[in-house]
């Protein structure tokens, strides 16, 4: 019954969304890729909001139901049938409203074959942004091969309008191959490869407090044409925060927004919750909160950043399972354990059965068994962390959405009363799961 109800709701809301697009004809910026979609969406919105009348996906709505919700400006009703009926009514009123954004920023995700095709039958982007295509992408378990995931996502490029703009990550060869599918104008962004927008002089910014240098974000220089300007990215760590910012700058340049205005827009920008976000922990510790989701490439980047952070106390890595990897799961968890073993943190804490393979691999390459703790769920791991965290410690917490690793962060967060604004999955629906 729930499945039938869901299908009916999706059908009705999609019809309403189609009518809204037909009436108002907004320009559409569509973002896809396997890593960094939500961060790129947020950065693009931030770069353009002062110059364009624009709306973005709320949270990470990027599914078959998420796209019409965003177009209609509605919230997710989850399992509340009354809320969904209200959504249908409000959605109908949107068709006859007098005001509507001139631009939409839509994050387009893929869970299974055919997802992109369903959306592109009625959503025709003016701008397409592709983030990255890793060797083993997220959601690969629903596809026959990793290449099939990429093939599905590149269908978004074919759906782009002929006079549109394709924004590509110049550092990713798989992404750059999609340029041949577009009849529009191509702009690129990169770090290792030269793009229309390029970032260099990348480093971790710090501030002195309580006797040690605490990480505060990322510092970069951005090159565009003859201009090279400094830019600070507050609150997040890793090049995974640099790429969304320079992708946003590339979109802005393509749309002829003044370059210095784009750079200025990031003065008060703060990175998204749960994505290598720097938080103050209990007992003057620092939490690196990467609990939104996890995949092999994101894991590798997180470990790389963690290895660069200096701490006067302990370095603790709390890892939850990486989900939706299908037949690649065991091998990828062993690879993750190898990376952990090489940096040899003071403590490794794993959550879930898959991460046990990571723990064993870390031990195999030299990590001491007494430094490794294993738990069935994030609540137990959080209680452990609450007892072990001390002054000067740096704690990286990472895992897939289904592992609910934000519960670990909740236990050791300094400002618990502010966690709704700081952590992922803090609404009542998630809290009651």
Image (cartoon, rainbow, N blue to C red):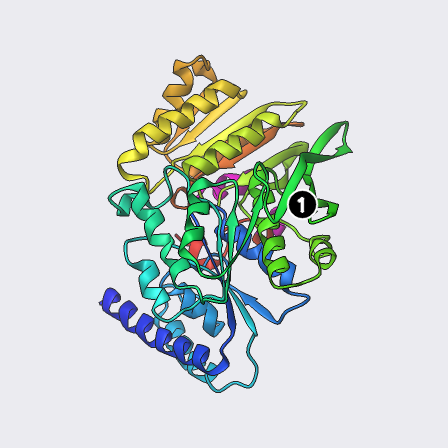
- Give the percent coordinates (x, y) of residue 280: 65, 39
Q: Above or below — where is 30 with respect to 377?
A: below
How many labels were placed on the picture? 1
What residue is shown at x 39% (from left), y 77% (from top)? 18
- Give the percent coordinates (x, y) of residue 367: 46, 15
Q: Above or below — where is 265 with respect to 139?
A: below
**Relative side of 88 to 327, left or right:** right
Residue 414 falls in image quadrant: top right
**Relative side of 265 to 142, left or right:** right
What residue is shown at x 61% (from left), y 63% (from top)? 255
Say what secondary structure mark 1 lies in: strand
What residue is shown at x 57% (from left), y 54% (from top)? 420
Q: Is the magenta stretch mostly helix, strand or loop?
A: helix
Camera-side residue of 174 and 415: 174
Crowding near the residue tagged with mark 1, few <14, some 14–19, many ≥20 C-alpha atoms within 10 Å: many
Camera-side residue of 158 and 293: 158
> Does the magenta segment cover residue 1?
no
Q: Mark 1 points at which residue?
A: 233
Range of residues picked out in magenta: 404-419
Residue 53 falls in image quadrant: bottom right
Residue 394 falls in image quadrant: top right
């Amino acid at each position: 019954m729930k499945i039938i109800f869901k299908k009916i709701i999706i059908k009705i809301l999609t019809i309403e969304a189609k009518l809204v697009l037909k009436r108002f004809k907004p320009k559409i910026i569509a973002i896809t890729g396997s890593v960094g979609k939500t961060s790129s969406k947020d950065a693009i919105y931030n770069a353009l909001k002062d110059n364009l009348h624009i709306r973005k996906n709320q949270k990470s709505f990027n599914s078959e139901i998420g796209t019409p919700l965003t177009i209609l400006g509605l919230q997710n009703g989850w399992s509340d049938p009354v809320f969904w009926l209200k959504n249908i009514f409000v959605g109908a009123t949107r068709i006859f409203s007098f005001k509507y954004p001139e631009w939409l920023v839509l994050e387009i995700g893929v869970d299974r074959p055919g997802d992109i095709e369903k959306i592109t039958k009625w959503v025709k982007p003016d701008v397409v942004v592709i983030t990255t295509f890793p060797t083993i992408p997220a959601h690969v378990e629903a596809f026959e091969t990793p290449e099939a995931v990429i093939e599905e996502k590149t269908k978004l490029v074919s759906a782009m309008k002929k006079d549109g703009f394709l924004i590509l990550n110049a550092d990713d060869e798989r992404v750059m191959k999609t340029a041949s599918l577009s009849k529009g104008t191509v702009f690129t962004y990169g770090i290792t490869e030269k793009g229309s927008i390029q970032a260099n002089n990348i480093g971790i910014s710090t501030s002195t407090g309580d006797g040690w240098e605490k990480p505060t974000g990322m510092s970069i220089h951005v090159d565009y044409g003859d201009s090279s300007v400094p830019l600070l990215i507050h609150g997040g760590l890793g090049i995974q925060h640099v790429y969304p910012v320079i992708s946003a700058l590339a979109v802005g340049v393509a749309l002829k927004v003044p370059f210095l205005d784009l750079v200025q827009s990031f003065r008060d920008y703060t990175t998204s919750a749960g994505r290598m976000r720097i938080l103050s922990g209990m007992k003057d510790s620092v939490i690196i909160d990467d609990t939104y989701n996890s995949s092999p490439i994101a894991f590798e980047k997180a470990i790389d950043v963690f290895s660069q952070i200096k701490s006067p106390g302990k370095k603790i890595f709390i890892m939850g399972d990486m989900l939706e990897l299908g037949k690649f799961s065991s091998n990828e968890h062993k690879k993750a354990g190898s990376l952990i073993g090489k940096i040899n943190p003071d403590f490794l804490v794993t959550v879930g059965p898959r991460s046990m393979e990571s723990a064993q691999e870390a031990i195999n390459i030299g990590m001491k068994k007494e430094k490794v703790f294993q738990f069935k769920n994030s609540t137990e791991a959080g209680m452990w962390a609450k007892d072990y965290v001390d002054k000067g410690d740096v704690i990286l917490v990472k895992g897939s959405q289904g592992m609910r690793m934000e519960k670990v962060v909740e236990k050791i967060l300094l400002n618990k009363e502010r966690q709704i604004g700081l952590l992922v999955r803090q609404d009542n629906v998630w809290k009651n799961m």
